[in-house]
Amino acid sequence: MKRVAVTGGAGFIGSHLIDNLLKRGNKVLCIDNLITGNRENIKHHMNNENFEFIYYDVSKPFYTDIKIDFIFHFASPASPIDYQKYPIQTLKVGGLGTHNMLGLCKEHEAGFLLASTSEVYGDPLIHPQTEDYWGNVNPIGPRGVYDEAKRFAEAITMAYYRYHGLDTRIVRIFNTFGPRMRKNDGRVVPAFINQALLNNPLTVFGNGSQTRSFCFVQDLVEGLLTFMETDEHYPINLGNPKEMTVLEFAEIVIKLTGSQSDIIFQKLPVDDPKIRQPNIARAQEFLNWKPKVTLEEGLKKTIEYFKEKL
């Protein structure tokens, strides 16, 4: 049994990760200031003696005498609506928060996994994106607060690995979806599903030709837990390499929901990536991992979740 801390543990991915960590017999410390997280995502664990929740902002120094064996650092706003609403908080948790959690790992001689993002590649000039690509990021654009926070987080994580010999890992997460996404977080999956369930028009930005690759959350969590047990320290992409246009995705959502929705088009946001597809060769080599859940399977589960929330 390990004692594992998850920052941002009341969020979408963090809460699913905690579910699986507890199922595997670990003790879990969930740390979240609930700026975008939700107590509903973790309330089913509140009476579990192996689970503890701490309401806290990890951008501030954090100490505990309780021995910690591993930290998953997921704390950060993650959708454009959120990190543009909380730009300073996003930069602070990516910089100060990551520094604080790495320091805690050093103190406890614990392992560390940074939840980075495909956004470190920006609006990429190579396709699909491999881990050795340095990215095409606008540091002063509206998305820069998130992109550069994660790029700094990766840099300081590698510095702690090289300078202090800390046992670190970096995962670059591509578009992930599933139950517990927030209805109004602005990302394409919850936006399209909720619009379709209400028979409202689906809002496609640009002409819909921009591409995305969607990975179901349980597949991602399996990859994270496998990565936790390895000694690979360089970044690994986790995502589904099956690519499609946003317009194709809108049509799939309409079909699966049985919606009567139309599709309307609006102006493409500034610096919105035109292509997004992970190369997962490193994940297959080092983790023996690839997604198993089909898009339709995952969407059906996600649609049922949002139906219950209407």
Image (cartoon, rainbow, N blue to C red):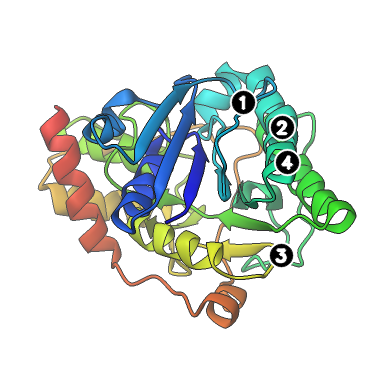
Q: Which residue is mark 2?
A: 100
Whole-angstrom CA distance, mark 3 to mark 1, is: 23 Å
Q: Amino acid at mark 4?
A: Glu
Q: From the image, which quarter does the N terminus lie in?
A: bottom left
Q: From the image, which quarter does the C terminus lie in?
A: top left
Q: Which residue is mark 4?
A: 107
The vertical placement of 191 against 174, above or below, is above
Whole-angstrom CA distance, mark 3 to mark 2, is: 19 Å
The vertical placement of 34 against 240, above or below, is above
**How busy is the neighbourhood of tag 1: few (under 14 within 10 Å), some, or many (20 plus)?**
many
Q: Which residue is mark 3?
A: 233
Displayed quadrant of residue 47: top left
**How busy is the neighbourhood of tag 2: few (under 14 within 10 Å), some, or many (20 plus)?**
some
Q: Position of residue 180 (x, y in %)?
A: 29, 38
Q: Earlier in the sequence, mark 4 or mark 2?
A: 2
Q: Which residue is mark 1?
A: 58
Name the residue rendered at 67%, 23% in the picture: 59
Disc 4 vs disc 3: which is toward the camera?
4
Q: Which residue is nearer to you in this view: 117 or 207?
A: 117
Q: Earlier in the sequence, mark 4 or mark 3?
A: 4
Q: Earlier in the sequence, mark 3 or mark 2?
A: 2
